[in-house]
Image (cartoon, helix red, strand yellow):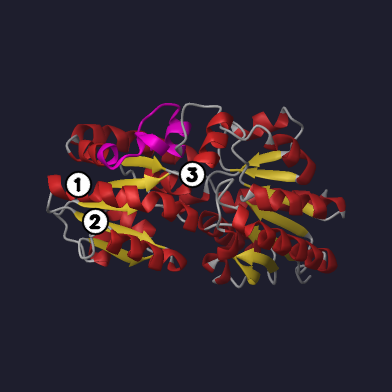
Amino acid sequence: MEPRKLTFGMVAGEPSGDLLAGLLLDALVVRWPGLQAVGIGGPQMLRRGFDAWWPQSLLAVRGYIEVLPHLFRLLSIRRELGRRLLTSRPEVFIGIDAPDFNFGLEARLKAARILTVHFVSPSFWAWRAGKLEKLRHCADHVLCIFPFEPELLALHGIAATYVGHPLASVIPMVPDRLAARAALGLRPDETVVALLPGSRESEVKYIAGPFLAAARLILQARPSVRLVVPALPFLRSAIEASVSASGLAGRVEVVAGQSHQVLAACDVTLIASGTATLEAALFKRPMVIGYRMNWISWQIMRRRNLQPWVGLPNILCREFVVPELLQGDATPEALAGAVLNWLDSPEKVRALEQRFTSLHHELRRDTAKLATDAIEKLLAS
């Protein structure tokens, strides 16, 4: 019998979600040959044949105040996307992260009896406790990437499945640093510092300046250090402008994409808080997590924080295994000093690598199969 051909709606609102969605699509099309996936996505999804009605870059906004200039456009897109999905009626809608955009859309679709799956639980255990009631209202099932989440969600009547973190299967347990350096034109013996100032325009606006000022101080202490910034295509011009404004043109190399190559190749990374910090941990790299945002957004965020940690590696390890320098603490001097401390502490680096290897094993599961199994059960229910 010919397999049933299905249509799934999907929305991935940022590059990390695009990566997760791309990996999920690989498994979905194996389980359901001929599957058509439509909605909002990025380059990873497009490479799998995804039909993007709008580009993902339109949703890449983070913060409370930062989103205001884009709010009318975002609401308009969500309204029109909902209308199109209600007309086409996909078998399942999968919202990949981006809860502020996806929850309202999922609630609308669920009310119309379209099955809804939310992939990546919002961090209710960190600072989004208020999202739980919304999640229960809008999602028929939640796919969790951290092992402790399903039990906590069950306490609130939310059906969920732990599927592991897809990146733990994509990123090798022992990264090939020499190959990564060769691909980037870096020598095997030089010291490399990676700068990752975020994956959104608002992040680059607030974070690139302090990171580059820290880079200048690092170069003063260690003139031979190579500085590399992987930049998403739609952010490359903004990052290059920041590099030029900092006076570091010619000393900081901006490369197109290749964040995994850069993380595999570097000795330490100065990195914005977000999914990229987990990627750095899976590459077993020491890091300094830095973050700045609009002052009002920061005041709102800090009042919602339920844990002492913000960075994913620290949250998962339940202690400060890497330094976090946030908002007013993210000064160039403090950021540079923390980076140099890693470079001067090889024993600490080796201990961190062992800790991150254990974390990698814990998160590595057959995510794509577990996720499609959960979706198949939902379809059959």
- Magenta residues, as a range? 312-335
Instruction: Examine the structure image and report whether residue 207 is included in the region drawn in magenta.
Output: no
Q: Alpha-carbon distance for marks 3 and 1?
A: 35 Å
State the residue in front, 70 or 119. Answer: 70
- Badge nearest the viewer, 3 or 1: 1
Question: Does residue 138 appear left or right of residue 372 in this picture?
Answer: right
Q: Position of residue 275 (x, y in %)?
A: 48, 47
Give the structural element (helix, strand or loop) at label 1: helix
Mark 2 nearby-residue class (10 Å; few <14, some 14–19, many ≥20): many
The residue where tag 2 is placed is 227
Which numbered circle lies on residue 310? none
From mark 2 to mark 1, how far is it between C-alphas?
9 Å
Is 14 located above or below residue 329 in the figure? below
Residue ID at (47%, 35%): 310
Q: Position of residue 291 (x, y in %)?
A: 42, 42
Residue on which the image places disc 1: 218
Please state which amino acid type lies under the numbered disc 1: Ile
* Residue 323 colored in magenta in the image: yes
Evaluate whether residue 176 shows in this view: no
Which of disc 1 and disc 3 is earlier in sequence?
1
Residue closest to the eye, 241 or 225: 241
Q: Quadrant of residue 314?
A: top left
* Mark 3, residue position: 364
Quadrant containing the N terminus is bottom right
- Dot 3, crowdedness within 10 Å: few (<14), some or many (≥20)? some
How would you rate the neighbour count of disc 1 (Cα within 10 Å): few for under 14, some for 14-19, many for 20 or more? many
